[in-house]
Image (cartoon, rainbow, N blue to C red):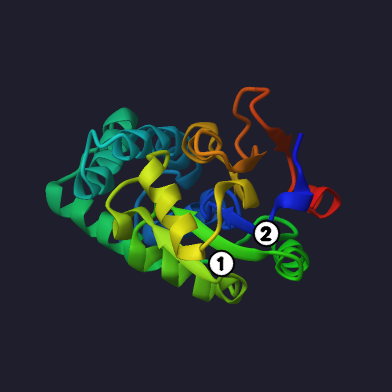
Amino acid sequence: MINSHKVQHIFFDLDHTLWDFEKNSGATFKSIFEELNFDFSLEVFLDFYNPINHYYWKQYRENMISEVELRYLRLEKTFEAMKVSFTPSLLERVAELYIQQLSTHTELFEDTISVLEYLSSKYTLHIITNGFEHVQQRKLENSGIARFFKTVLTAEKIGVKKPHPTIFLSAMKTAEVLPEHAMMIGDSLEADIQGALKLGMQAIHFNSHKEAYHEECLIIDQLSDLTNLL
């Protein structure tokens, strides 16, 4: 259970929590496919790419690979799995276009704006994200939600990624809030929820990509549930 009366500050994850990564990523690849005249199915590509991307993000989060390796390996392994021929220059071009265009897409999860309007009238809101600094800032601004957040803390800025305790401690120090008055809301049990709970924060798991059921904290399936809970 949660104790909303103690909460003063709420920390949100961004990708897969507020900003709909899968839809925006798909739209980005659609425009890349059109620009580069790829002759294979976007839908088939995304069926391969999405789980591969999740795998390499986990590798990146655990410091097994670098940012550069993340950007290229997820594409290389997708093309290999599809048995599509490619050159290093093609991978470089796709990776470059992807980073350039991703943050121009602005699809949010349903009810994001209304939920943030409601919560910002009661709590101070912040972002803690493992995404890249310049990309995440553009996502917030282009999608029209930057105005809701007092602080935005990225793993790139701090030098460690969620669930490392340093990023949560840095976020709370910046916000000047104690753990017992802080709540984390995110989509990843490992990165967002367990990382926050270990430091004494409260947490709500927005299970946007159907992780396995658990009893570590409250689980919601839609953001609008927050208006009844907080």
Residue 75 vertical placement versus 137 (above, below): above
Q: Name the residue under label 1.
A: 106
Left or right: where 160 falls relative to 50: left
Query: Who is closer to the viewer here, 205 or 54?
Result: 205
Of badges 1 and 2, nearer the viewer stands: 2
Could you say which is closer to the camera, residue 185 or residue 70? Answer: 185
Percent x, y for residue 72?
23, 45
Percent of width and height locating residue 147: 59, 77
Spatial CA span between label 1 and label 2: 28 Å
Quarter of the image with the N terminus is: top right
Residue 131 location, quadrant: bottom left
Counting from the top left corner in percent of width and height, residue 212 is at 61, 23
Q: What element carries label 1?
A: loop
Amino acid on which the number 1 mark rests in the picture: Thr
Q: In this view, does 225 lie to the left or right of 97?
A: right
Residue in the image at 82% along x and 48% along y: 229
Q: Quadrant of residue 100?
A: bottom left
- Which residue occupies 63% across, 56% down? 10
Q: Residue 8 carries which label?
A: 2
Residue 99 appears in view: yes
Q: What residue type is labelled 2?
A: Gln
Query: Residue farthest to the left?
Result: 88
Could one spot residue 30 in this view of the protein? no
Q: Is residue 95 above or below residue 54?
A: below
Left or right, 97 with respect to 209, comes to: left
